[in-house]
Every structure is written in C-alpha cells, then in structure tokens.
Image (cartoon, grey):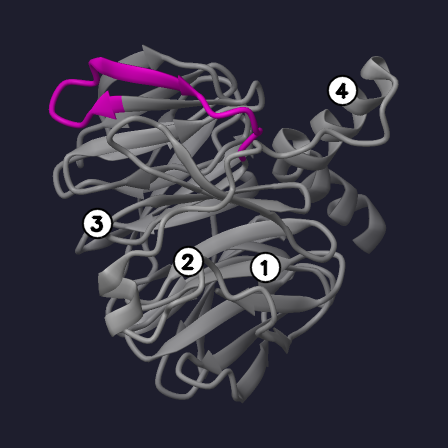
Amino acid sequence: MKRIVMGICLALAMVAGVSLISSRAQEAGVPETQPPANNTPPVNPLRVALLKWYPANLTTSFKVGEQPYGLAFDGENMWVSNNGDNTVTKLRANDGEVLGTFPVGGAPMGLAFDGANIWVVNSFPNTVTKLRASDGKNLGEFAVGKVPFNAAFDGEAIWVTNTQGASVTKLRASDGKVLGTFADNGAPSGILFDGAHIWVSNFDSVTRFKLDGKQAGTFKVPTSFSALAFDGSDIWVPSNGGTLTKLRASDGMVLATYNIGTDGSGIAFDGVNLWLTAGPYIAEVRPSDGTVLLAKRLVGDLSGLAFDGANIWAGGYVNDIVFKL
C-alpha cells in the first residue's frame, strides 16, 4: 500500500519536473534537457553585505527522512515532510541541526504553519496532522478529502487541496473542525493565501476562492500540479511547458507569461526573486522581466521549496536531504 501511495504522490508532484524533462530529452535524441545558458548573475552588493557573495550555496545540505517533499518555516525552524517514511523532521534553520523527527499519517506531502502549529497533509489515509511547533506534540489528526496534496493558512483556518474529487477542504485551525468542502476544477494541487483570497492551481487554470468558500474567479493559465507563489501583489504560476505566468492578485488579470526555458513544479519568493524547481534543477528568476538569473543542477530530484528570511531551502526527494542555498 505504501508503494501505491508513493506512486500516486510522485505522479502528482513530479509530473511537472522529471517526467517532462526525461520525455523531451528522449524525443530530441539527447540525454537530458539543459537549463538556460544564462546562469551567472551579476554580484549583488546587498548579498555581499549579508555574506552571501556566491550566487547560490550548492554545498550545504542536511540529512532528513526518506523522500522529503514539503517544507515550511515557523520563524526559527524548518519543517520537512518525509513522504517515504511517514515522518516530519524539524531542523534549526541557522545551522540545520535536527531538533526532532515526528510520526504523522501516511505519505505526508504539503505543510502549513498557523503561527503556533505545523499542519501536515497526509495523502493516505486522507487526513491532516496538527503538530505543536514548540515540541512536535501531536494535537490531532483530521479527515479531509481524497488524496490531499497541499495546505495554506488564512489567519483563522487551514485550507487543503484534495486531488481526487476536485475539492478544497477548510478546517478551523483551533480544533480541526471541518468548516466546509468546496468544489474546484480538475485536480487541485498548489494553494496559497494572498491576504484576501485563497488561490488553487489545477490542470490548466487557477481558482480564486473567497474565505466563505465561494469561487471568485477561474483563470486559464498553463499549469499542471504546480505550486503557487505570491510576491505581495501578484500570483505566480509555473507550468510544465517551461512558462511562468504572472496574475494580478486583485482581479486575476494575466499581466505576463514568460518563457523561462525550464519546467516548474516547486516555487518560492525570497522577497526579491522567484525560485523554481524542476527535476534536478533549481532556477532563480527576476520577476520584473522573467530573466533567469541562475540555473543550477543539484543532486537528485528536487521537490518543495521554502524561504526562511535569509536562505532558500529545497527538498532532495531521491537523496533524502534538504539543501540550504
């Protein structure tokens, strides 16, 4: 059963990365799609002042559990869901020391932090686990929809995407009570809160929900089981076709679609630029014009991304490590 669940999760999480890169390479008769050639950005003086004189730290990594996928930052520590062994690892962000490893439900995927607790999405058996962030104590496991994938916090409630059954579940963060399950399109995967609405990614669109669960618009964009990012004013959607779409959060208007030359599954915003993962590659993209500032290959296949206020973290799904860039 564990292998079956892992297969489902891999099909959802990696479709935008490894499968597409491999299939395109075979069609072209080359061993592997290469990242964009423009991978040496100019040195940013502010980064030098912060002792980050390198474009990206490609050597610092920490061992976690089996097949890490989701990442979340709680203000001091980085939390990592380990899809392969049904645990969550807590690491101190400043030095990567493991502070604890905690059992959760089957095949954990996305994570969300509510200010005091970490919520873990368990793809099997269709639940979310609430862990107290201070010590990892299990505060409860709550049922959601079928094959849940990711989660977001809106200040009061936890929202969970359910990839089977095309729905989104809203739970009260204080006690896990289900406040509603709302129909969506396709197979909901990525999810975020922009301060006013919940945004959910599907096969070929993103849906905007009001906090009462009513849809406030569906916007056609190229996507496929992608994560989403918010930069303070706009929503960013990577696709499995090598594009990155920018939508105005206030009304969903498409402001730009950039052909960045690399597929995207994971995405995060670091306060200045966007970071994306696709298979073994990680890329840094300038939001103003879609320029790829950095494209590097790390070890194995990458999964989720998170920003801790100083560094980008990426999960190494195959190698059971997380990278701190």
In this figure, which residue is indicated by the disc labeled 1?
315
Q: CA distance from mark 4 to mark 1?
A: 24 Å
Q: For numbered disc 2, what is the local secondary structure?
A: strand
Question: Which numbered disc, 4 or 1, marks the residue closer to the eye?
Answer: 4
Q: Nearer the viewer, mark 3 or mark 4?
A: 4
> In this rendering, which labeled residue sits more in front, label 2 or label 4?
4
Q: Amino acid at mark 4?
A: Arg
Can you tell which quarter of the image residue 45 is in?
Answer: bottom left
Quickly name the residue at label 4: 24
Instruction: Please check the rendered image and state whether residue 221 is part of the magenta-colored stretch, yes or no.
Output: no
Tell which tag, 1 or 3, sits nearer the viewer: 1
User: Going from the N terminus, do you reach mark 3 or mark 2 first?
Assistant: 3
Say few, some or many: other residues with alpha carbon within 10 Å of mark 3 (under 14 / 14 to 19 / 20 or more): some
Q: Circle 3 is placed at which residue position?
A: 154
Instruction: Kindly tell me whether residue 289 is visible in this rendering.
Output: yes
> Is 248 inside the magenta-drawn segment?
yes
